[in-house]
Amino acid sequence: MTNQVPEPVTFGERALQIEDVLALANRQVPTALQSDSAYRQRIAKGAQFLDSLLDKEGVIYGVTTGYGDSCVVAVPLQHVEALPRHLYTFHGCGLGKLLDAQATRAVLAARLQSLCHGVSGVRVELLERLQAFLEQDVLPLIPEEGSVGASGDLTPLSYVAATLSGEREVMFRGERRQSSDVHRELGWEPLVLRPKEALALMNGTAVMTGLACLAFARADYLLQLATRITAMNVVALQGNPEHFDERLFAAKPHPGQMQVAAWLRKDLAIDAPTAPLHRLQDRYSLRCAPHVLGVLADSLNWLRSFIEIELNSANDNPIIDAEAERVLHGGHFYGGHIAFAMDSLKNLVANVADLLDRQLALLVDERYNHGLPSNLSGAPADRAMINHGFKAVQIGTSAWTAEALKNTMPASVFSRSTECHNQDKVSMGTIAARDAIRVLELTEQVAAATLIAANQGVWLRSKAADARPLPPALAAMHEQLAVDFPPVIEDRALEGELRLCLQRIADRHWRLHAQ
């Protein structure tokens, strides 16, 4: 039986979803460019219209003028061809870490999708080369720092423009290479960017939008995982599953909150008889879990809307309307919607970290864990005094949570006037997106630690004389986890297992509620 080749993601007039970008970023699907003659002619018409304006010596921002504050500086026609190279050259000043391969693919996808609207004045050949970069996995090395999120992601996207032109470096087949060498190896001629093409590539929101797509997907899976961890902790702590009763949530019907409660009911098989309760009302980190996680669940729809509208927009300047033969000067490079979405997402996700951190604090503390051993140690009584189980893991989790909470300061309110006060109000969308990714990294670390600890708690509870069978969903999860994470009986360093758990989260290894 042969493996079926997945349908390609086709760039063109079809709108993309976040899931398309995620599949491209993970190299799970091939790519294609819409190829019908009517579409190609529409793309070509924009570039042809720009050429006709140059023949008439029309004034076009970034084509016959300087950039930004220099828009009042006329560029003589004999220098127009050199202007694109100067644009990506002087923006080659990015610093910080390089975007990883997954993020770089998402950036290329976001930029290509924007240019495929046909109102950016670029040639079909440019779209073809961007699509070829994705298909052949030629990845520009893009420093992640240096964008204020308007006039778009100029500095990071200059590395895309430069590598398309055979300059700077790319990652290709696992090696850091000169872009010119890779072009030669693939039999390509580096592009000589036409008037407006460097500006079209750089003056947009592709970096923040690509990162936002990845952040959304991670948050969506984290929501489901945090719900499953909560259910395991209700069992480990002998909590009250009636806190998630359907009738209770009908009285406060936020849809996402109701969904999380429904997932918990399914995980806990709430209709089954329950054990005697230690407390009529559990502490908030269990009882209010649907209310905490439900805010994230209810926010995903509008977060998706903000991100996907930006993904499927023309977000450079100026916009070239070849049909009406007009050049429209505006500010579509401004990333305010992505900035707000990412500032909001990092707040929502950090609250998940705080929730799970509090659950872990209950698990390890003999005063609150209803009979589990101190620090969840599985050591026998004669060795209990020298074993400390999850003590340090809980300290680390507290540190990761604190850092996640610290990073929730909104980036979008830190607009800085730049570029001779031409860019005097900027979005900071790319910084917000990078912050969101960092908060997700930290919260996934909290989730990994709490998941392994919850599994230990479930195992310890199963050894009790009055142990009850696990509900089916949790029994399956417990069995899966046991393969990678055996019980902690004698102290051992858990770093390797935590890192493996993080990889499992990144791979979406466990099938959860919405899958």
Image (cartoon, rainbow, N blue to C red):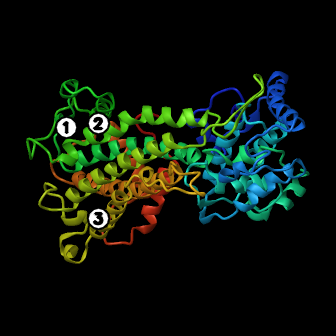
Residue type, mark 2 in image: Leu
Q: How crowded is mark 3: few (under 14 residues within 10 Å), some or many (20 or more)?
A: many
Mark 1 and mark 2: Cα distance apart in space: 8 Å
**Residue at figure coordinates x 72%, y 30% from the top left:** 12
Question: What number is the disc on residue 264?
Answer: 2
Helix, strand or loop at label 1? It is helix
Instruction: Give the position of the N terminus as an image quadrant.
Output: top right
Percent position (x, y) of residue 171? 73, 60
Q: Do the residues labelled 2 and 3 touch (CB within 8 Å)?
A: no
Residue identifier under label 3 = 394
Q: Residues within 10 Å of mark 1 (few under 14, many from 20)?
A: many
**Residue at figure coordinates x 18%, y 46% from the top left:** 284
Residue type, mark 3 in image: Gln
Horizontal relation, residue 237 to residue 213: left or right: left
Mark 2 and mark 3: Cα distance apart in space: 24 Å
Percent position (x, y) of residue 271? 21, 28
Q: How crowded is mark 2: few (under 14 residues within 10 Å), some or many (20 or more)?
A: many
Q: Is residue 10 above or below residue 398?
A: above
Mark 3 and mark 1: Cα distance apart in space: 25 Å
Helix, strand or loop at label 2? It is helix
The label nearer to you, 3 versus 1, is 3
Asked whether the viewer can see residue 173, the reply is no
Q: Do the residues labelled 1 and 2 touch (CB within 8 Å)?
A: yes
Horizontal relation, residue 509 to residue 246: left or right: right
Question: Counting residues from the N terminus, which is met first, the one under dot 1 or under dot 2?
Answer: 1
Residue type, mark 1 in image: Pro
Helix, strand or loop at label 3? It is helix
Return the residue nearer the eye: 356 or 133: 133
Q: Quadrant of residue 315?
A: top right
Residue identifier under label 1 = 241
Question: Counting residues from the N terminus, which is met first, the one under dot 3 or under dot 1?
Answer: 1
Q: Is residue 430 above or below residue 487?
A: above
